[in-house]
Image (spheres, rainbow, N blue to C red):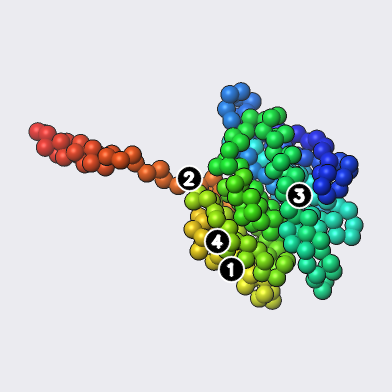
Amino acid sequence: MIEKWKIPVWPVTGREPRTVYVYLPAAAARDGDERFPVLYMFDGHNVFFDEDATYGKSWGMGEYLDWTDTGLIVVAVDCNHRPPRGRLNEYSPFTFDDPYFGHVTGYGRRFMRWLTETLKPVIDSRYPTLPQRETTWIAGSSMGGLMSLFAVSEFNHVFSRAAALSPSVWAGRGRMEQLIRRTSFGPDTVVYMDYGSEEARGQAQTTGCFWRCAGALADKGVFLTARIVPDGRHCEACWEQQIPIFLPALMYSPPVPDPPGTEESTQAEETDERNEDP
């Protein structure tokens, strides 16, 4: 089930209502006491419905989650559509000038403070969430991918896991890498990031930024999946194909160590079994 409702993003666009999409798993209807992890996503209009998507093609996230019966709540917020650079400004953590896009004013931090301090409490009060950091994740593509890396770094106390598909790490001239290297990540932080082989063609500077950010995350001890997608392009159809890869990566559970003394106890039990008469 997907609910749609409106809320203003006050720090960026004032009173203008913005659409919030909330996917609830079938298990929520089957068991009223069960609670679920939450994945926040950027560009909410492109996540679920083709008729709402900018180019007429969504990620089809709801269909995948229904088909796999995945116990996950997904909260996807519509982006800032104001011309001339509403989305770029909102989804950039940094202010910068670009030869193609012109001057970009970085409202990314404002948006993330709104999401964590205003939207998240609303979601946690209305829906059966597991609200703690370990079960609060974030994902996006392009500038939303950049924001996902920013969120898991600057707001690591809120988000423990992030998926950044085709992240626009070129924005800010290496500042994302610098932020990662300054961040003290929680020991359970998980990051998935990818880039399409076709969109990388002739983009040596961007792919260099991509791998430097990946290297910085690895240096910080983050559980990292970084890949180049064969024939991958910069579009919703390609990002949809990555759902079966990035979602399991986000839902990865590190092995839980045995309590002290368990190993010795297990070895003793195995020895006793070997010593028993047949």
Mark pair 4, 1: CA separation = 10 Å
Whole-percent x, y for residue 194 in the image: 61, 61
User: Does dot 4 land on a helix, a strand or a loop?
Assistant: helix
**Label whose residue precedes the other's in the sequence (4 or 1):** 1
What residue would you read off at disc 3?
111
Q: CA distance from mark 4 to mark 3?
A: 23 Å
- Residue 101's label in the rendered image is none
Q: Earlier in the sequence, mark 2 or mark 4?
A: 4
The amino acid type of the residue labelled 2 equals Ser
Q: Are marks 4 and 1 in contact (CB under 8 Å)?
A: no
Q: Nearer the viewer, residue 29 or 40?
A: 40
Asked whether the beta carbons under mark 1 and mark 3 sit within 8 Å of each other, the answer is: no
The amino acid type found where label 4 is placed reads Leu
Query: Residue 151 at what x, y percent from top left?
Result: 66, 52
Query: Residue 268 lies in what quarter of the image?
Result: top left
Residue shown at 63% from the left, 62% from the top? 179
How many numbered badges does the structure rendering display?
A: 4
Residue in the image at 78% along x and 67% along y: 96
Q: Which amino acid is tagged 3?
A: Phe
Q: In the rendered image, which residue does mark 4 sit on?
A: 217
* Lower sequence index among marks 4 and 3: 3
Q: Which residue is mark 2?
A: 253
The secondary structure type at the circle numbered 3 is: helix
- Name the residue: 69% across, 30% down: 125
Whole-number angstrom distance, CA of label 3 to CA of label 2: 29 Å
Q: How many other residues sit within 10 Å of disc 1, few (<14), some (14-19) or many (≥20)?
A: some
Residue carrying label 1? 211
Report x, y in % for residue 253. 48, 45
Q: CA distance from mark 1 to mark 2?
A: 25 Å
